[in-house]
Amino acid sequence: MLLVDSRNPQQTKSFTQALLEPSSPTGGLFSFQNVPNLDFQAYLHLDYTQLAQALFGVLSLDVAPAILQEALKRYEGFSDIAPLKHLSPTLYVQELLHGPTLAFKDMALQPFGILLSQLAQQRQEKYLILVATSGDTGPASLASFASLPNTYVICFYPASGTSLIQALQMQTMDAPNLKVFGIKGNFDDAQSTLKVLLKDTGFKAILQKQGFLLSVANSINIGRIVFQIIYHVWGYLELVRHHALHYGQPLNILVPSGNFGNALGAFYAKQMGLPIAKIGIVSNANNVLEEWIKTGVYDIRQRSLLKTYAPAMDILKSSNVERLLYALLGSQRTLECMQALEQEQIYTLQPQELQILQKHFESFSCDDESCLKSILETYQKYGYLVDPHTATALHAYQQLQTDLPCVVVSTASWSKFAQTTLLGLQGVASTDDRQALEILATQGITPPQRVKELLNRPKIHTEVLETASVASQIQVWLEKH
Ligand SMILES: *Cc1c(COP(=O)(O)O)cnc(C)c1O
């Protein structure tokens, strides 16, 4: 299947082209145009890898089977792939946190790195991937690309804006094709510095002279989204296999959302015929998405970004909403809405458009106080410890007005956010994650082995840059490669 620019249907790319070069001159995102309708029942007997291969097949994505197989082998390094935990008669939690960096970003980024590297080798090209991270994308990108041929990753994180564990996951990464910089400022500063560079033709020309092409590994890359369809399908099929559902019975899904990539994967699965009743979008106090789905108004005029306990959801311009607009309303309307958002910071859906949106989605939000409460209540009720992002979705579950079974998507291990976890469980403030982990350990709450090891690993990357020196530091590093 050819992918289409969400703002201009004349602009198409194959999947591999869009993966290597995700940007479009219109500013749009390469998207699926019409996904096939499937009877997923036929996939009940497949294991995770076979399911992924089958979905790549029916979507007619131009990836050679041998390369895909190589990419999917990455799941062998997970302690589990996407298991479901049964918490109450109608509540399941799907854990997407068993990859190397303990967040759901691994689900897509692990195989994605192999795909990109293999394609780059075939074409004898070298790719530079610039990553700005608020905490989870950085570690997952570095872990994916470490030592992969023909790929180089430079990662920027806000120097005082991530959890200790997230910072260590980046600072201790040791591979010749990886570089990590702290940025003086917040995530927005890191992100906008990169956005400016990615648009700078002079900068691109210099890179090209040095033999590098630019790509990105964030969720505007459709190569990430495709891997995020699979686990939603897997989750449903698991429930059928375990006789929790008959095939065809509807299911609700709740997704803690930021850039809407995870939820978009669920939406594509629904469009392909997976019996999902509603996809519940959960926001934190930055509840633009909640408001949009309830009222049809996407309005960021009066908003400034709030820092919350669920930082991966601290987003105002949620990038993958654009792909949803395209799928529901077509390219003309997508262009209008996105231009209005860029120019006026607001757009409004027509009543019939809002109806279409609400056929698929409902929305919730959870402020910091409710998030802490949800961590505690989930632990007390089910003996189950969740991270703050997952806690927002469990808070939303309490408000669901339905008896349908529900899958809450769990996006990270609590151990990446130990300070908030401790605060939620016991109301105890700690100086940093290390101390919080120590206090929790005295009570028998211990983190996964990967986190314990991290605390003693030497830091390789310790530089912190002013935003103004980012471009020159990139060049200095590239000259050595
Ligand atoms: C990235 C992330 C999210 C948000 O996912 P989107 O696909 O951007 O909506 C939620 N929780 C955690 C822990 C994350 O890392």
Image (cartoon, rainbow, N blue to C red):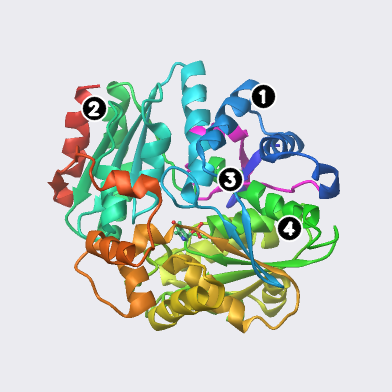
Q: Which residue is mark 3?
A: 81
For marks 1 and 4, give the CA distance.
25 Å
Kind of residue at disc 2: Leu
For marks 1 and 2, give the CA distance.
33 Å
In the figure, 396 relative to 219: above or below?
A: below
Q: Which residue is mark 1?
A: 65
In the figure, 398 relative to 101: above or below?
A: below
Mark nearest the camera among 4 and 2 is 4
Check if mark 4's residue and mark 2's residue have beta carbons within 8 Å: no
The kind of secondary structure element at disc 2 is helix
> Residue drawn at (16%, 43%), measured in percent from left and top?
462
For marks 4 and 3, give the CA distance.
21 Å
| Magenta-highlighted residues | 9-37
Question: Residue 4's quadrant in the figure?
Answer: top right
In the figure, 425 relative to 269: above or below?
A: below
For marks 1 and 3, give the CA distance.
21 Å
Mark nearest the camera among 1 and 3 is 3
Q: Nearer the viewer, residue 74 or 20?
A: 74
Check if mark 1's residue and mark 2's residue have beta carbons within 8 Å: no
Q: Which residue is mark 4?
A: 270
**The residue at label 3 has a CB less than 8 Å from ligand 1:** no
| Label ID, residue 478 | 2
The kind of secondary structure element at disc 3 is loop
Q: Residues within 10 Å of mark 2 (few under 14, many from 20)?
A: some
Dot 1 or dot 4: first in sequence order is 1
Kind of residue at disc 3: Ile
Kind of residue at disc 1: Pro
**The residue at label 4 has a CB less than 8 Å from ligand 1:** no
Q: Where is residue 77? Give x, y as percent.
A: 50, 35
The answer, for residue 347, to whether it is visible in the render is no
